[in-house]
Structure formats: structure tokens, C-alpha cells
Amino acid sequence: MRLVIISGRSGSGKNTALHVLEDEGFYCIDNLPVTLLPSLVEKMTSGSDSPTKIAASIDVRNMPEALAEFPAVLASIKPLTISMEIIYLDAQDYTLIKRYSETRRKHPLSDHDIGLSEAIAMEHDLLEPVASRADLIIDTTNLNLYELRDRIRQRVSGSRDGNIALLFESFGFKRGIPLDADTVFDVRCLPNPYWHPELRKYNGKDEPVILHLKREAEVRQMLEDIKNFIDNWLPKYQQNNRTYFTVAIGCTGGKHRSVFLCEELHNYFQAKLSNVQVRHRELH
């Protein structure tokens, strides 16, 4: 039996995630009360005709006191023989505000006394008991609908075989660190191709930048150090029941050094693991 819990702040893409899982053959339940989670699990494990894959959305439409009980409810069902994972979607506050402004929908917590910005901040606090126990956090700030669908499909489908799903994500520090990063490497100390006018128009996937960076001893050393870190420590995370692991690598603009390193790491680990992905935030 497999249970995927989808949670996150309103406007982060929970409905899209549920639709993707439904397409993947999951029996989907929207807005499941936290207190009914044990009953759902019991039903899943008691009958031969029960669905083998269920996805349930748990969000702020629950009563606040019920969300506070989530850790205790989770602890009560952990010993049962089911495969369970929690996926939490989120986005920057300004993005959630923009999405609500565009759709003109009402936030579940807003009323004549509580404005949209305040409701979004309240929701962050109310969902903390769920977010802090998530197996995977996906930052949808810079994802469009199709990218989010692909991310959910790749990550959920990729964890079926019990192996860890490894994602390398390049980014630019000037636009902030990705919310879904499990570990972050800062490579701004490396020589920057941007300062070579003939390379400025290219990115880290283009041959001129690749050849330039491969000639730099510091770049080669950084690459080897990151490889060694992941080789040494990823098995420890996996032993701790981690299903997903996101390695974020950042440079100033997120288009040259970080992209190059992510591509090199993706190619290296593809030969060693069954589910390795790469994403370049600033190239989308």
C-alpha cells in the first residue's frame, strides 16, 4: 500500500499535484481531515479490494487544532506496513499574492478582518506541523503549470523502486536560495565566465563555457569535492529513510558556473543511480 500526502499553502499548486497523481493511477482525496487519516490507513490495509495507491490533500481548510495534532496522528500510523511520503508545496509570499490577485479567488483564511497578506502568513504558521515533517518540499515560485506537473510526475514515479531520487538544481544567489534544497553549495568563489565578453552570451550547457571551465583547476577541484561529499553522505541520508534529495548549486547569476557543475554531476551520478534529474532555475 502506498500513501502520498500532499500539503502546502493555498496557491502553491496542490490541485495540480493531485491531478497528476490521479493520472498516475492514485485514488485521490481532496481536503482530508487530519483526524480521519488513521481511519483511511486502516481501510487501506484491511481489505483486498482497497486501492493500492492513495493520495490525500491535507491543508489549511482543516481546523487549526486538527493541524496541530498532525505529528501525533502521523506517529500513530508510522508503525503500520504502508509506504508513506509527504510532499509539501510552497512559494514565495509575493508569488502567492500575485496568483490570488490574478485569479481573484478568496483565500481560505481571509475575511473582512484578515487581508490576503496576513492570511498567507497565518497559513505558513498553521501548516508548520506538516511542513516540518515533509519528505519532499517543492518550491513552485518559478515553476509554470507544465513544469510543476513534470516535477511531481518525475519525483513521485521515480521513488517507486525504493531508491533515492537525486535532483541537481542550479540557481543564482541574486534571486534567492531554492526553498526545496536539502543542501546548498556556493560556487561564487570560482572563476566567472561572465567576465569574459566572448563567453557572456553563453551558459554552462554551451561548449565554449564548458571548455573554459574545464581548464580551471579550481573548478575541477570543486567538482571532485562535491562528488566526494555526495558519494560519502547520500547513503547515510538514504539509510535515514530519505526518498528525495535535492542538491542546489548557486553562483551569482545562475547561468554559468552552477549550470556547468550541475550538468557534470548529473552525468556522473546517472551512471550510479536509477533516478537522477537536473534543473536550471535561471534558464527557465
Image: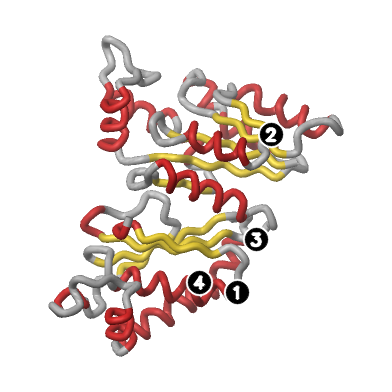
Which residue is label 1 attached to?
A: 272
Marks 1 and 4, how far apart at CA? 12 Å
Asked whether disc 2 touches disc 1, contact meaning CB atoms under 8 Å apart, the reply is no
Which type of secondary structure does the marked residue at label 3 adopt?
Answer: loop
Residue drawn at the location 41% of the way across and 60% of the way down: 279
Marks 3 and 1, how far apart at CA? 11 Å
Q: Amino acid at mark 3?
A: Asn
| Residue 245 seen in this snapshot | yes
* Residue 184 versus residue 207 in the image, above or below: above
Which residue is label 2 attached to?
A: 76
Q: Quadrant of residue 101?
A: top left
| Residue 129 seen in this snapshot | no
Which residue is label 3 attached to?
A: 163
**Rendering coords of residue 173 (x, y %):** 25, 59
Residue drawn at the location 60% of the way across and 55% of the way down: 243
69 or 124, nearer to the observer: 124
Marks 4 and 2, how far apart at CA? 33 Å
Instruction: Give the mark nearer the N terminus: 3 vs 2.
Output: 2
Residue drawn at the location 60% of the way across and 60% of the way down: 164
Give the number of the disc on residue 230.
4
Label 4: how many Cα within 10 Å (few below 14, some 14–19, many 20+): some
Asked whether disc 1 touches disc 4, contact meaning CB atoms under 8 Å apart, the reply is no
Relative to residue 129, is residue 94 drawn left or right? left
**Rendering coords of residue 127 (x, y %):** 45, 31
* Mark closer to the observer (2, 1): 1
Marks 2 and 1, how far apart at CA? 36 Å
Q: Amino acid at mark 1?
A: Lys
